[in-house]
Amino acid sequence: MLEDVKNYYGQVLKTSADLQTNACCTGESTPPHVVAVLADIAPEVAQRYYGCGLVVPAVLDGLRVLDLGCGAGRDVFILSKLVGENGSVVGVDMTPEQLAVANAHVDEHRQRFGYADSNVRFVEGQLEDLDQLELGGEGFDLIVSNCVINLCQDKAKVLADAFALLRPGGEMYFSDVYADRRVPAEVAGHPTLYNECLGGALYWNDLVTLARQAGFVDPRLVTDSPITIDNDALRALVGDVSFYSATYRLFRLDGLEPACEDYGQRVVYRGTVAEHPDSLLLDKHHVFPAGTPVPVCGNTWRMLHDTRFARHFDFEGDMTVHRGIFADCGSGLPFDSEAPASSGSCCC
């Protein structure tokens, strides 16, 4: 299967137009500041983009970033611009043909961004071997991945290695394809469905379990959208399984709790993130309007207080008085829930 994937992305696919399904296509809208950067991405790099989400979270200036399964480097170069010359981005991919395209355009993007020195580096290797690659000794502030982990056989190890590579307070922010049930063998073993990110898709609740086992105690769903399959033969083979493109964020924070606990805390977004002056999104259940006090659970408070977001918030309360469970978060399919309210109680 590994060799099939390498061949598919190295030899079969030349541009996104060669895809047989729309799983590896980004459905969510692109914010203006990212659109502006995309205009500077080399056409050959942009044409070899096979992502299913937007892995560009807020507050990136100066961060040290790792991109898992970077392909030809589109997301690496976008992040290269957004972290600035004081930040850096390392891209890892196992496909030599993709990395050859990425490396061919390193200096071009350095010049387009006006940098004295390039702040990107590409490393060839498998995501299951992250602990064996030369990625540098310091922890990363942010790890991203775009529609690649589904292609890995040992997803648990990828998540565990990612956790180990993050500094305390760091974040894994990644998009991938998920299913509403465990994918049957005939779908998982179909070459085209596997290579185009459906066959290896995790049942969403298994992703939550694996993330927690890796140390990411409170996974947060950020965005999601249903995937449609226009190929009639592949649609018939998939049957009743529903697929979704979803972005999760996982924080490396010690002491997070497995449930939404109430300590009477509130946060106020200052409106100081330049690209998000009116409100800032944390996850699907938390959008913080500027200047508005919002009650939050203990975990949400820490995801803001103990991370790079802290300077953009004011914090009220601490964790000395426990008031019980914060809210009933439900246990149904997360992709069926409504989009976040602009303020109010949190639900993890």
Image: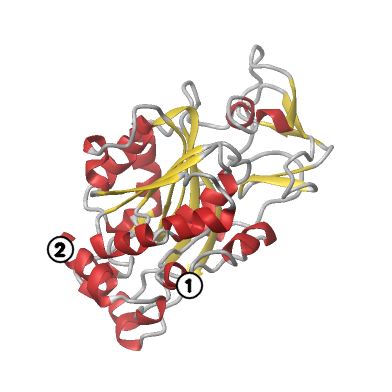
Percent position (x, y) of residue 69?
A: 34, 54
**What residue lies at 21% left-to-right and 64% top-to-bottom?**
6
The disc placed on residue 43 is 1
Answer whether labels 1 and 2 touch (C-beta < 8 Å).
Answer: no
- Mark 1 surroundings within 10 Å by alpha-carbon count, few (fewer than 14), some (14 through 19), many (20 or more): few
Name the residue nearer the viewer: 290 or 84: 84
Q: Quadrant of the C terminus?
A: top right
Q: Is residue 54 above or below residue 253?
A: below
Percent position (x, y) of residue 317?
A: 73, 18
Q: Please, which residue is most extreme toward the bottom here?
A: 232
* Left or right: 335 as drawn, with respect to 102: right
Q: Which residue is mark 2?
A: 3
**What residue lies at 47% left-to-right and 56% top-to-bottom?**
75
Q: Mark 1 falls on what kind of element?
A: helix
Q: Is residue 250 above or below residue 110?
A: above
Q: Amino acid at mark 1?
A: Pro
Earlier along the polypeptide chain: callout 1 or callout 2?
2
* Left or right: 126 as drawn, with respect to 272: left
C-alpha gap between disc 1 and disc 2: 27 Å
